């Protein structure tokens, strides 16, 4: 069975005033060879080192040991790639490279190390924005390309640190557009055939002029290795996310109440369309923003604010940038003719609000506790509130105690514990029995399987006598 593997492993604010005048790296003239382009951009490509355990006095090299072994197996630190996007030290990488890191260090192309802090991150698009410690001079920074104009078949170059081998370069073409990783939630990745591997996460994908057309994020690996199918987040989406992270450290999401699917040629013809460009509406949640806008099942979304929607990927990219309360203009196809409607997206409830809603769905005597988590048995209604699959069973997180072991591991309201000690969690009795058995065996931790959004994670949670 094919697996999707992330191509990585798991401010010092006050920059000097002169930084405002920093200019991006000067790129070679158009038509220059690949080696000239790589030479020019390499000073702005970095290696990102994230440490998850307690800090020690050992050197990075001592802690790393064998680079390949550590990047594959170590749970104490991870290696990824990144690149500088502004002269005052802003660095872009993948969120999964630095998620829950206790310490972040950036290794520059010349081998020097810089401490970095997390400005903000977005799990959905897998983007993290870091800030390195300020210097009295500008950091070399890369330039963005217009990824909306990138076409299938165009040459690209990937730069990064696969298996810790910094400054590695591979070449290829854009193999496809609008790709989805697994079951989402983002549906507009560029597919590339350049060789990227574990450790390339967060590195730049360059066009023929040396500009960043995407951020290398994941590979399709049936046997655990590269087979020439990689995925890169388009630069256009990355820039939108980064701009929001820079202002507020997170990306605010909206909800539409819209269910859609790809438009096939046959369906397009049946609806009177001459092209399969667009997205078919198959359901509208009652009382949702889409319902209030007048959208109905069998409508076809053709464009958003004048920008054509070629498919699911394009609509997903547009929706990812919607702002609550800011109207967007939709061009639809209904009953054989075009129709314009205005949609007013609503803010998606944050974790605290979801927790209150989840708690209100559970009876007071149905709560369980573990490692700072407040848990309750799942119901269809609770799963819908949390945005989880209705069929997912187990114990749902309705609250997380601040500064608890669960909070330190990134568990959030709406996550679901679906397994214990490697076995599916089928009942609340199984949960209490497993906790008791762990205590009786003298073990301090229990292995849980967690459904976090669309992703499944395994982690150990401490079992306290008070739980």
Image (cartoon, rainbow, N blue to C red):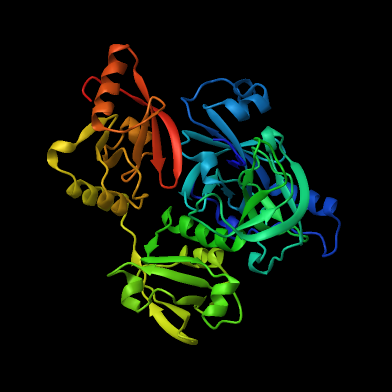
Q: Position of residue 15 (x, y in %)?
A: 53, 50
Closest to the observer, 56 or 127: 127
In the displayed structure image, the side of residue 386 where residue 270 appears, left or right: right
Q: Position of residue 460 (x, y in %)?
A: 40, 26
Q: How many marks?
A: 0
Q: Is residue 59 above or below residue 314?
A: above
Choose top left, top right, bottom left or bottom right for residue 190.
Answer: bottom right
Q: Is residue 350 above or below residue 81?
A: below
Q: Position of residue 17 (x, y in %)?
A: 55, 56
In the displayed structure image, the side of residue 247 where residue 63 appears, left or right: right
Question: Can residue 308 be seen by looking at this rendering?
Answer: no
The residue at the point 74 percent across, 49 percent down is 194
Question: Can residue 73 be seen by looking at this rendering?
Answer: yes
The residue at the point 44 percent across, 77 percent down is 299
Closest to the observer, 194 or 1: 1
Q: Is residue 376 above or below residue 328?
A: above
Q: Position of residue 381 (x, y in %)?
A: 25, 52
Location of the N terminus (image quadrant): top right
Closest to the observer, 430 or 95: 430
In the displayed structure image, the side of residue 5 where residue 393 appears, left or right: left
Q: Is residue 406 above or below residue 289?
A: above
The residue at the point 47 percent across, 55 percent down is 245
Location of the C terminus (image quadrant): top left
Given the current orientation, which residue lies at the most extreme bottom position? 337
């Amino acid at each position: 069975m094919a697996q999707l593997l992330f191509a990585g492993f798991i401010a010092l604010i006050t920059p000097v005033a002169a930084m405002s005048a920093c200019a991006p790296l000067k790129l070679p003239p158009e038509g220059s060879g690949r080696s000239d382009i790589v030479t020019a951009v390499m000073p702005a490509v970095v290696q990102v080192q994230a440490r998850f355990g307690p800090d020690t006095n050992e050197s990075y090299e001592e802690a790393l040991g064998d680079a390949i072994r550590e990047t594959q197996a170590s749970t104490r630190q991870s290696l990824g790639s990144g690149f500088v996007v502004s002269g005052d030290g802003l660095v872009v990488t993948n969120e999964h490279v630095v998620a829950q890191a206790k310490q972040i260090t950036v290794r520059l192309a010349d081998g020097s190390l810089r401490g970095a802090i997390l400005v903000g991150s977005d799990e959905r698009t897998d983007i993290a924005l870091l800030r390195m410690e300020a210097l009295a001079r500008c950091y070399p920074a890369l330039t963005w390309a217009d990824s909306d104009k990138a076409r299938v078949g165009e040459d690209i170059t990937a730069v990064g640190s696969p298996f810790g081998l910094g400054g590695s370069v591979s070449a290829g073409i854009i193999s496809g557009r609008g790709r989805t990783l697994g079951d989402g939630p983002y549906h507009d990745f560029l597919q590339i055939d350049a060789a990227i591997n574990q450790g390339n996460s967060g590195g730049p994908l360059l066009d023929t002029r040396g500009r960043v057309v995407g951020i290398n994020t994941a590979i399709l690996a049936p046997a655990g290795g590269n087979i020439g199918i990689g995925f890169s987040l388009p630069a256009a989406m990355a820039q939108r996310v980064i701009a929001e992270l820079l202002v507020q450290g997170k990306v605010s999401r909206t909800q539409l109440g819209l269910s859609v699917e790809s438009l096939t040629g046959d369906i397009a013809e049946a609806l009177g369309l001459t092209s399969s460009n667009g997205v078919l509406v198959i359901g509208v949640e009652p009382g949702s923003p889409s319902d209030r806008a007048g959208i109905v099942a069998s409508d076809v979304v053709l464009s958003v604010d004048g920008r054509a929607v070629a498919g699911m990927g394009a609509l997903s990219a547009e929706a990812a940038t919607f702002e609550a309360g800011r109207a967007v203009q939709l061009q639809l196809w209904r009953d054989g003719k075009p129709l314009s409607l205005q949609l007013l997206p609503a803010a998606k409830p944050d974790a605290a609000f979801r927790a209150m809603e989840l708690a209100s769905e559970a009876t007071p005597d149905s709560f369980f506790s573990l490692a700072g988590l407040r848990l309750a048995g799942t119901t269809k209604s609770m799963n819908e509130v949390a945005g989880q699959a209705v069929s997912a069973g187990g114990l749902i997180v309705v609250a997380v105690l601040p500064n608890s072991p669960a909070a330190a591991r990134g568990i959030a309201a709406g996550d679901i514990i679906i397994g214990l000690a490697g076995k599916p969690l089928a009942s609340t009795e199984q949960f209490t029995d497993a906790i008791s058995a762990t205590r009786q065996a003298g073990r301090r931790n229990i292995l849980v399987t967690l459904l976090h959004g669309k992703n499944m994670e395994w982690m150990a949670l401490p079992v306290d006598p008070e739980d």
